[in-house]
Amino acid sequence: MRNNEAFFLVCMFSIILFLALLNGYFFNWINDIFFNYNNNSENGLKDFSIIEKFIIIIIVGPIIETLIFQYLPNEALEKLKIINKKYLL
């Protein structure tokens, strides 16, 4: 049973890695075809002042990251009534 689990995890990791790489290439292609945005310095923050950079990086970024990667997936899983029984006490 352990070998099947390990094989499954390796397959899932490989699939997710492939999809992540495909996602990067896809959005780079979209950028090249439609938007042609190219900024080689400061991750696109070149035109902002120091205070604006501070607010975006230290305050806004973590809030948006928490919403996207913690709150929204939890809400979606609750609506689908999916419970991870592995971590229940």
Image (tube, helix red, strand yellow):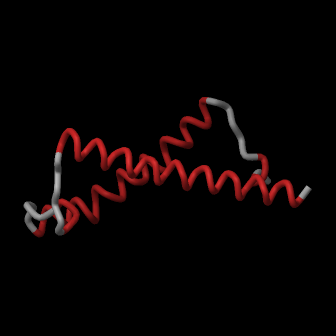
Q: Is residue 45 left or right of residue 61?
A: left
The spot of residue 89 in percent (x, y) is 79, 54
Q: Is residue 27 left or right of residue 33?
A: right
Residue nearest the viewer, comparing 45 with 80: 45
User: Does 80 appear above or below 54?
Assistant: above
Residue nearest the viewer, comparing 53 with 1: 1
Q: Is residue 36 left or right of residue 70?
A: left
Residue under the point 53% across and 42% down: 73
Q: Is residue 54 left or right of residue 17?
A: left
User: Quadrant of the image for the N terminus?
Assistant: bottom right
Residue under the point 40% across and 54% down: 65
The number of callouts visible is: 0
Residue under the point 78% across and 52% down: 86
User: Does 86 appear above or below 49?
Assistant: above
The spot of residue 83 in percent (x, y) is 71, 41
Q: Residue furthest right?
A: 1
The spot of residue 44 in percent (x, y) is 18, 60
Residue under the point 73% across and 56% down: 9
The spot of residue 31 in percent (x, y) is 24, 45
